[in-house]
Image: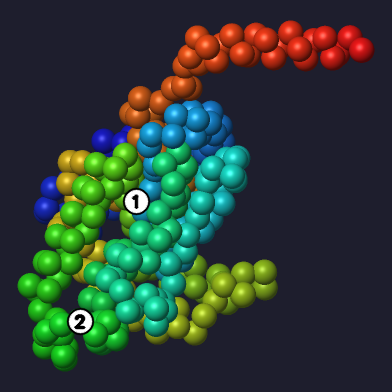
Amino acid sequence: MEEQYKFVKGDLKLADTPTKIDQPLSLKKAKEIVKKERKMISKLQPMLYAQHKYGVVIVLQALDAAGKDSLIAHTFSGLNPAWFDVVNFKQPSSIDLDHDFLWRINQQLPPRGMLGIFNRSYYEDVLISRVHPEILLNENLPGINNLKDLNEEFYEYRYQDIQNYENYLNHAGYVVIKIFLHISKEEQLQRFLDRINTPDKQWKFSASDVHEHKFFNQYIDAYQRAINATATEENPWYVIPADDKWNSRAIAATIIRERLEQLPLAFPEIAKEDNAKLKAATKELKKEDKH
């Protein structure tokens, strides 16, 4: 499964990449797979935490309404919340803008031993800014005085910064799993309409959704550029068809489990002196139990 959706080269064309699966699983089967994978991930999680050598960062990117939040809810609901974290990166604050664009990201990096999800991430700085470049003028960057300064060279530097950051995380013991939920323009529109017409979903709708939907093609181009520039063998992208939510959840859950299984996870062995202490403690507890 991991190899099927993995992308490491520089020639991705999202317009030619399917947003639907040729032979989709039935709803029942897809739910069964998500449940199975969730259970397996929850068994790996204690080893990840106990070993405390590796951290896992899941970078989850998608256009609006592609199903990021629901994927998180359904795939990770069985995990121990003490060893799991989800961070939603919204519009940067004035304090964030006073620092480099990776500063706020590193503040939210999960400790080693934990699994963390970045619901949107540092990639926003090479995605939204492609469609609305004026937001970069708020960063007060040297040499960036107007929109004309935001040329391809600027973005190439940012792509390289991202690659370097991900390599840095690898060297520090982090696994970076980058997932893009690939939704079609028609399906996104339908989900926006469902939000409007379904009372218990209306709270999700924002007028900005309609506005941003007009830039769908520009966002796809921005994602294509970013993925092509940052997909490497060490840190590939997984481009998952997302027009069917349950199938996309099944695929994502399987990929995450497979990547976790590639780590040499194991519970730490107890030293001989500690083993003797455990035996002594066992005897002591048994004595107390008799009283």
Task: Identify which residue is drawn at 24% across, 69% down.
Answer: 126
Provide residue 218's location: percent of width, then percent of height.
Answer: 24, 75
Task: Classify mark 2: helix, strand or loop.
Answer: loop
Task: Identify which residue is drawn at 32% across, 50% down.
Answer: 178
Task: Classify mark 1: helix, strand or loop.
Answer: strand
* Quarter where residue 55 is shown: top left
Q: Is residue 157 left or right of residue 238?
A: left
Q: Measured along the vertical axis of the image, is residue 170 above or below residue 184?
A: above
Which disc, if any, is residue 179? 1
* Quarter where residue 123 is shown: bottom left
- Badge 2, how many Cα within 10 Å: few under 14, some, many 20+? few
- Tell me, yes or no, if residue 190 can be seen here: yes
- Badge 1, how many Cα within 10 Å: few under 14, some, many 20+? many
Which residue of the protein is positioned furthest toward the left in this rendering? 153
Three-letter code for the amino acid on which mark 2 is drawn: Leu
Q: Measured along the vertical axis of the image, is residue 153 above or below residue 1?
A: below
Which disc, if any, is residue 194? none
Q: Measured along the vertical axis of the image, is residue 13 above or below residue 98?
A: above
- Mark 2 or mark 1: name the one nearer the start of the chain: 2
Front residue of 86/212: it is: 86
Which residue of the protein is positioned furthest toward the right in this rendering? 291
Q: CA distance from mark 2 to mark 1?
A: 29 Å
- Which residue is label 2 attached to? 141
Provide residue 25's location: percent of width, then percent of height.
Answer: 46, 39
Three-letter code for the amino acid on which mark 1 is drawn: Ile
Task: Identify which residue is drawn at 39% across, 82% down.
Answer: 94
Mark in front: 2 vs 1: 2
Provide residue 57's location: percent of width, then percent of height.
Answer: 38, 48
Provide residue 188's location: percent of width, then percent of height.
Answer: 42, 68
Q: Measured along the vertical axis of the image, is residue 13 above or below residue 77?
A: below
Front residue of 254/213: it is: 254
